[in-house]
């Protein structure tokens, strides 16, 4: 279960408490979503009113989330820091008399179900943490996105069946070199420690190689430089592993 489902999809009638435990919470949330789909239908007007009220709450919590995500490229907040920043932004929005959001008429804060807003915040934050804590690397698969004598691979970082990011790399066993082409993660899961998990996997799956990276942004170079200092495998800042990658 990803936070995006709670923040974009129709909400169940009742959100389970994250305090029910990691696996219990996820089981209860799935059950709530299924029960909501099979619940007796309300009248057309009741459905519209209910959808508008709950949609407004969801839109406010989602806006606070998206703004906090947008700050990540500069803020680089870890899990707990991200939660604090998201909570503070949501609290600030709910303290206003009215909220203006794209695609909505002005939302009067007094008309919002603030209890639902905070329950949704807790559930979505728990979903994000759960996804990160249970992220695992899938097995490497041969790939062929360019013509090169080197062996090309890719693998995904997944959590509960959902892909959070992907790693593309190549190796040349005769020359003892590896080249990391790209690590990409969904915006929701950047700066959560998953990049380190990905690099650790490269070293475990192909031990004894000297690793290279392609040209990177300043932020990415900083990440690789920090990782390089604690790695058991040799990493180099040079970008030309061997002639087999040309």
Image: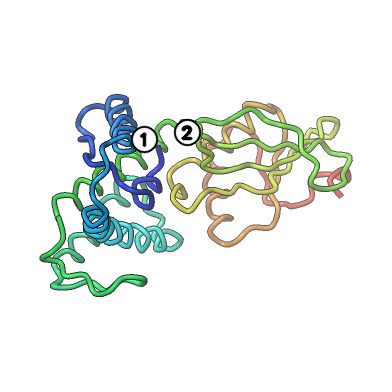
Q: Is residue 29 left or right of residue 116?
A: right
Q: Are marks 2 and 1 in contact (CB under 8 Å)?
A: yes
* Badge 2 element: strand
How many labels sit on residues? Answer: 2
Q: Residues within 10 Å of mark 2 (few under 14, many from 20)?
A: many
Separation of marks 2 and 1 at Cα, in angstroms: 9 Å
Q: Is residue 139 above or below residue 242?
A: above
| Figure quadrant of residue 99 | bottom left
Residue at position x 56%, y 50% in the image: 225
Q: Is residue 198 left or right of residue 208?
A: left
Which mark, residue 130? 1
Residue at position x 54%, y 55% in the image: 222
Q: Position of residue 150 (x, y in %)?
A: 84, 38
Quarter of the image with the N terminus is top left
Labels 2 and 1: the sequence-earlier one: 1
* Badge 1 element: helix
Can residue 87 be seen at all in this image of the molecule? no
Q: Position of residue 98 (x, y in %)?
A: 18, 73
């Amino acid at each position: 279960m990803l936070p995006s489902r709670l923040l974009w999809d129709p909400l169940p009638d009742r959100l389970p408490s994250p305090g029910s435990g990691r696996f219990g919470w996820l089981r209860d949330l799935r059950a709530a979503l299924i029960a909501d789909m099979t619940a007796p239908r309300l009248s057309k007007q009741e459905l519209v009113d209910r959808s508008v009220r709950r949609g407004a709450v969801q839109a406010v919590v989602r806006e606070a989330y998206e703004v906090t995500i947008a700050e990540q490229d500069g803020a680089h907040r870890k899990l707990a820091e991200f939660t604090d920043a998201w909570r503070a932004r949501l609290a600030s929005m709910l303290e206003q008399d009215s909220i203006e959001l794209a695609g909505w008429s002005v939302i009067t804060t007094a008309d919002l179900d603030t209890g639902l807003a905070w329950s949704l915040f807790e559930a979505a934050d728990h979903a994000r943490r759960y996804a990160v804590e249970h992220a695992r690397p899938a097995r490497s698969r041969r790939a062929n996105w360019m013509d090169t004598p080197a062996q090309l691979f890719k693998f995904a970082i997944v959590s509960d069946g959902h892909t959070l990011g992907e790693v593309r790399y190549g190796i040349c066993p005769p020359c003892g070199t590896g080249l990391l082409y790209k690590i990409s993660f969904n915006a929701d899961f950047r700066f959560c420690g998953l990049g380190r998990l990905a690099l650790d996997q490269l070293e475990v799956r192909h031990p004894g190689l000297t690793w290279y990276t392609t040209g990177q942004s300043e932020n990415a170079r900083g990440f690789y430089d920090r990782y390089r200092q604690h790695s058991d495998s040799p990493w180099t800042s040079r970008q030309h592993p061997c002639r087999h990658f040309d």
